[in-house]
Image: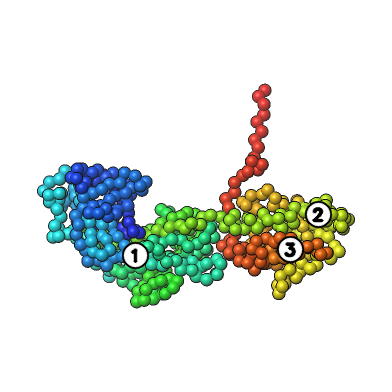
């Protein structure tokens, strides 16, 4: 009897049936399970098959038995019938941690005879099916114990990425057997590292799998095949082998692990939850297999679930409120000589305002040294940009009544590099004044500052966004920004 698929998932693994199969319900009635992908779980003494849409679950009679495999997560195995033996018989087996197994036996035809166990003819221990793996004649053959209950599957043991706040490796640990993404908002790291372990594959074979020396390997993310690159900065992902690697890789001592490094672009595009499918197989001709069937593709599945903030816009949630504060909007609303004169209540005339061209656009500056104290707004911090100036309205950065998406895209299109953004937010004393000081010249008092009220804390909000390439929220047109289509009158 051959094995069609062997799948390991989270607490409840899944299986895909390609043909309709008849099973028995607990009351002895016939249950026809249509083709599809199902989550398989234990339901008291029975098996429950739940389709993807979580409706119309099927409860199947199951034979309880035991196994001797050391597994940490449930394992589901589908065994179809084989020509010449019992072609009609189909079995779904669920192996549970702790040694219990449940087997639901069905058929393609729905006919139950002496060759197909049913309620009155249960599967005896002596009928335990054996996996007939092909006997590969090559010295490079994959070393797998040819027993259906001792399957060579990789499973996820490590997940880590560089934290945008600390800039240090951050290790993710599973919770109640499930992996949860620890990254906040849409601050997806440049690289996401996953460590895979197998207890049954020899170290030299892992090296050959990664190098694709006689083996094939494929990594899918949410169903999409990822392109393997030669290093961790090209393609969609990079694969390698590590040994005795502690945190952050989490490869146990005395073992070799396979690791996959996925780049930000496919990771962000996939959307949560992230479902990684690692598939590998031996490249061998059927004529060389030495058995009835070619080598099977073995697949391991890992699911990384989102957290409460995953996917939300960091700019909109954390940075946009800063731009909307009166300290910022007031400065950005002084984009004409008239606005500046009015703001200064008669102590400044239009003749004292200069229009100064810069690489980013026109700025309005005034002389007299009234704002020289701005250079010392943060004690112990020196700024390169200490001249007080206001952006001209022509620059389009009057932040009043603007959306988070507009402001973000305007900022990142003007300051389009890490260096430009860092220089603007770190080296401009006007920004430091708005978030740290608020002291007006000529003893005119002090204005409320932008939260968090501390320049260094402000940078701790801005810098993670810059580090992950400053993502913006999705742009949505407002009514005032909608394109207008003019329809000529009929003639």
What colour-coding does the image apply? Answer: rainbow
Q: What residue does disc 1 label?
A: 154
The label shown at residue 485 is none
Secondary structure category for the residue under label 3: loop
**10 Å neighbourhood of mark 3: few (<14), some, or many (≥20)?**
many
Q: Are marks 1 and 2 in contact (CB under 8 Å)?
A: no
The label shown at residue 343 is 2
Secondary structure category for the residue under label 2: helix
Which quadrant of the rendered structure holds the C terminus?
top right
Secondary structure category for the residue under label 1: loop
| Residue drawn at the location 52% of the way across and 60% of the way down | 184
Q: Earlier in the sequence, mark 1 or mark 2?
A: 1
| Residue drawn at the location 66% of the way across and 64% of the way down | 453
Give residue 28's quadrant in the image.
Answer: top left
**What is the CA distance from the residue labelled 3 to the residue labelled 2?**
16 Å
| Residue drawn at the location 64% of the way across and 35% of the way down | 485
- Compared with residue 162, is residue 400 higher up or lower down, i.e. above or below? above
Work out whether residue 294 or residue 391 is closer to the camera in this orientation and state it. Answer: 391
Work out whether residue 104 or residue 339 is closer to the camera in this orientation and state it. Answer: 339
Q: Earlier in the sequence, mark 3 or mark 1?
A: 1
**10 Å neighbourhood of mark 1: few (<14), some, or many (≥20)?**
many
Q: What residue does disc 3 label?
A: 438
The answer to whether residue 141 of the structure is visible from this angle is: no
Q: How many discs mark residues in the rendered view?
A: 3
Q: Position of residue 127 (x, y in %)?
A: 14, 58
The answer to whether residue 429 of the structure is visible from this angle is: yes
Is 333 situated left or right of 117 in this image?
right
């Amino acid at each position: 009897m051959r094995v069609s698929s062997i799948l390991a998932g989270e607490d409840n693994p899944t299986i895909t049936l390609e043909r309709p199969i008849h099973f028995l319900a607990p009351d002895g009635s016939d249950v026809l399970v249509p083709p599809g992908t199902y989550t398989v779980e234990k339901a008291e003494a029975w098996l429950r098959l739940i389709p993807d849409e979580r409706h119309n679950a099927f409860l199947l009679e199951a034979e309880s038995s035991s196994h001797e495999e050391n597994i940490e997560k449930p394992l589901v195995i589908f065994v179809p019938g084989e020509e010449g033996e019992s072609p009609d018989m189909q079995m779904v087996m669920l192996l549970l941690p702790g040694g219990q197994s449940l087997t639901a036996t069905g058929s393609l035809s729905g006919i139950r005879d002496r060759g197909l166990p049913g309620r009155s003819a249960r599967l005896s221990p002596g009928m335990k099916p054996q996996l007939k793996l092909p006997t590969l004649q090559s010295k490079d053959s994959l070393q797998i114990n040819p027993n259906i209950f001792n399957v060579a599957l990789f499973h996820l043991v490590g997940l880590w990425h560089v934290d945008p706040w600390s800039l240090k490796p951050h290790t993710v640990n599973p919770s109640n057997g499930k992996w949860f993404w620890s990254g906040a908002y849409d601050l997806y790291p440049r690289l996401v590292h996953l460590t895979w372990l197998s207890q049954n594959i020899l170290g030299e074979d892992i090296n050959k799998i990664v190098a694709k020396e006689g083996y094939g390997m494929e990594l899918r993310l949410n169903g999409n095949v990822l392109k393997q690159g030669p290093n961790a900065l090209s393609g969609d992902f990079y694969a390698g082998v590590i040994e005795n690697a502690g945190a952050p890789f989490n490869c146990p001592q005395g073992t070799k692990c396979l690791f996959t490094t996925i780049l930000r672009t496919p990771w962000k595009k996939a959307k949560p939850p992230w479902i990684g499918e690692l598939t590998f197989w031996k490249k061998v001709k059927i004529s060389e297999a030495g058995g009835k069937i070619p080598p099977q593709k073995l697949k391991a599945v890992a699911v990384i679930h989102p957290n409460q903030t995953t996917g939300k816009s960091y700019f909109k949630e954390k940075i946009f409120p800063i731009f909307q504060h009166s300290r910022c909007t007031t400065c950005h609303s002084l984009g004409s000589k008239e606005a500046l004169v009015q703001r200064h209540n008669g102590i400044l005339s239009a003749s004292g305002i200069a229009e100064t061209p810069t690489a980013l656009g026109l700025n309005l500056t005034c002389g007299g040294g009234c704002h020289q104290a701005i250079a010392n707004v943060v004690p112990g911090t020196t700024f390169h940009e200490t001249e007080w100036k206001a952006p001209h309205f022509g620059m389009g950065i009057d932040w009043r009544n603007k959306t988070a998406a507009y402001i973000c895209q305007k900022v990142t299109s003007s300051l389009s590099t890490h260096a430009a953004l860092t220089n603007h937010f770190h080296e401009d004393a006007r920004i430091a004044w708005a978030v740290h000081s608020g002291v007006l010249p000529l003893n005119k008092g002090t204005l409320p500052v932008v939260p968090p009220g501390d320049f260094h804390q402000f940078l701790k909000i801005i810098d993670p966004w810059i580090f992950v390439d400053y993502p913006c929220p999705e742009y949505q047109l407002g009514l005032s920004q909608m394109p207008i289509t003019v329809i000529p009158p009929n003639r």
